[in-house]
Image: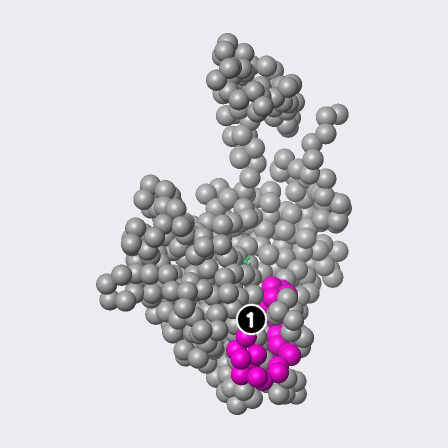
């Protein structure tokens, strides 16, 4: 496909050619020579970008079971609400008096998220999940600083999302890994071995990245609290537990949510997102300022937070994302629980359908996702998980997350989400089974996939190490 520059055919309009007298413009700002932008007529521009967009994969096009990412359908009405003029034309520096509507919306969202997580206070500022983790760990750090308790380590299970150790490390903590047991859960004895008075916190995902619920979470939270340590809950995939339980009941002190996974903001193109953080009462005084408060008459930005870690984002967070999440929560009401039920049911249904054809290293009931292994295909036919993922692209299906979590060899991590029908799940299962059979009978077809995509095999290492993003005329 040609670039828009190569399609330049001088069919556009050059404004300066059309306007005879340019004297109304300050001559200091006029270009001396024409800038090199492609001149292409409107219809050709439309065709160009339509063709490009058709090459993209999106949820509106097909099944998108990218594990840990919750690529579900997000109702379009939320976009409409976020784009209302009253929202988009608000200036962040307007006074509290003049932005009561927006402040009320943020306040109500904080209240809703308090109910959903069980936490006592919320900040809406962080712009993503990992940003929420960073904020949470900064709060943990400050909490111990103010207490005069020097704690240097953070424990992270080996099944954790990669952002967890990265966030804790960025706050200056030393990472201590703790291994999983045969059931894919935190090994309590291994945890006890590394638990000492230097440990500030444990960062956990529950269900963990294997999609398995940590049965011993109450024992873990007791162990941590008895040691004077805190518990951080990675709530990025909240459609696994929403409405059934919450981190407070499990004994956690800090939690982040991904509004752009669970609460109806489409994502995958790099944002914007939102990763609100909830904390228990003892940590309220450490939240980023401002939080949105209500004095009985007025909603206002409260900067008066005693030990605030400061601001973590310009102004108050990604407001448009907050509008979408609030709209989604109001629309769903108590049906948020049904979203969880459907997400968990869909994942277990697919797991049971596929476990005959692919290895399932942890054969346990799962929550919102499950992790297969391509080990058998690799061993018997020399076909790696990457090949299977590429072959799926031929079938109008986005590949699942692969090679993550690290504790499963040749991992294939599948998250169907709550928004898919049984018919779609069956279709996907059929494709996965067909590919498993191809591995045996038509090995070459899988090894040389994808066959139908605009771009075939790319050198992923080269693309990551030496990205060449600039167009140069040939
Ligand atoms: C997606 C995800 C994150 C990171 O969220 P971002 O918004 O991409 O920063 C963290 N933890 C888990 C478990 C996730 O699935």
The colour mode here is one colour
Q: Residues within 10 Å of mark 1 (few under 14, many from 20)?
A: many
In this view, the residue farthest toward the left is 297
In which image quadrant can residue 322 be found? bottom left
Ligand 1 within 8 angstroms of badge 1 C-beta? no
Question: Circle 1 is placed at which residue position?
Answer: 137
Residue occupying image coordinates x 37% and y 61%: 301
Residue occupying image coordinates x 54% and y 42%: 57
Task: Provide residue 105's location: percent of width, then percent of height.
Answer: 32, 56
Residue occupying image coordinates x 68% and y 53%: 386
Q: Viewer-proximal residue, 386 or 257?
A: 257
Relative to 8, 300 lies left or right: left
- 397 w.r.t. 32: above or below: below
Q: Is residue 327 visible?
A: no
In this view, the residue farthest toward the bottom is 226
Residue occupying image coordinates x 74% and y 61%: 379
State the quadrant of the C terminus.
top right
Q: Is residue 326 magenta?
A: no
Q: Which residues are magenta?
A: 142-167
Task: Provide residue 429's location: percent of width, then percent of height.
Answer: 52, 54
Mark 1 element type: helix
State the quadrant of the N terminus.
top right
Q: Is residue 144 magenta?
A: yes
Q: Viewer-proximal residue, 17 or 278?
A: 17
Q: Quadrant of ligand 1?
A: bottom right
In this view, the residue farthest toward the top is 20
Task: Provide residue 191's location: percent of width, then percent of height.
Answer: 62, 84
Q: Is residue 197 visible?
A: yes
């Amino acid at each position: 496909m040609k670039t828009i520059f190569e399609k330049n055919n001088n069919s556009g309009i050059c404004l300066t050619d059309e306007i005879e007298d340019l004297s109304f413009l300050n001559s200091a700002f006029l270009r001396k020579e024409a800038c090199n932008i492609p001149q292409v007529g409107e219809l050709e521009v439309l065709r160009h970008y339509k063709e490009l967009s058709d090459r993209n994969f999106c949820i509106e096009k097909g099944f998108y079971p990218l594990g840990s990412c919750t690529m579900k359908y997000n109702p379009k009405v939320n976009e409409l609400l976020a784009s209302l003029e009253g929202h988009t034309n608000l200036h962040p520096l307007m006074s509290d008096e003049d932005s009561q509507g927006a402040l009320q919306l943020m306040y109500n969202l904080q209240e809703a998220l308090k109910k959903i997580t069980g936490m006592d206070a919320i900040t809406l500022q962080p712009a993503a999940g990992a940003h929420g983790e960073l904020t949470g760990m900064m709060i943990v750090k400050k909490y111990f600083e103010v207490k005069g308790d020097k704690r240097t380590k953070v424990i992270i299970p080996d099944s954790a999302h990669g952002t967890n150790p990265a966030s804790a490390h960025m706050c200056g903590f030393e990472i201590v890994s703790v291994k999983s047991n045969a059931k894919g859960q935190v090994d309590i004895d291994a945890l006890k071995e590394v638990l000492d008075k230097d440990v500030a916190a444990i960062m956990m995902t529950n269900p963990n990245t294997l999609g398995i619920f940590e049965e011993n979470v109450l024992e873990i939270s007791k162990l941590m609290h008895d040691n004077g340590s805190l518990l951080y809950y990675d709530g990025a995939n909240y459609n696994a537990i929403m409405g059934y339980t919450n981190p407070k009941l499990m004994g956690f002190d800090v939690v982040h949510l991904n509004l752009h996974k669970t609460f109806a903001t489409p994502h995958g193109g790099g944002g914007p997102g939102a990763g609100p953080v909830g904390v228990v009462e003892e940590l309220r005084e450490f939240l980023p300022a401002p939080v949105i408060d209500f004095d009985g008459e007025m909603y206002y930005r409260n900067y008066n937070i005693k030990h605030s870690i400061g601001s973590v984002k310009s102004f108050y967070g990604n407001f448009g994302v907050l509008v979408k999440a609030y709209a989604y929560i109001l629309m769903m009401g108590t049906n948020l629980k049904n979203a969880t039920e459907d997400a968990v049911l869909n994942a277990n249904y697919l797991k049971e359908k596929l476990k005959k054809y692919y290895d399932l290293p942890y054969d346990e009931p799962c929550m919102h996702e499950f992790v297969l292994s391509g080990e058998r295909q690799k061993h018997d036919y020399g076909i790696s998980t990457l090949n299977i993922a590429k072959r799926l692209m031929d079938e109008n299906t986005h590949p699942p997350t692969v090679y993550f979590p690290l504790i499963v060899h040749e991992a294939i991590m599948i998250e169907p989400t709550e928004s898919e029908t049984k018919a779609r799940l069956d279709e996907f299962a059929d494709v996965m089974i067909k590919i498993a059979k191809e591995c045996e009978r038509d090995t070459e077809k899988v090894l040389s996939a994808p066959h139908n995509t605009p771009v075939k095999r790319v050198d992923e290492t080269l693309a990551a190490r030496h990205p060449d993003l600039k167009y140069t005329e040939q």
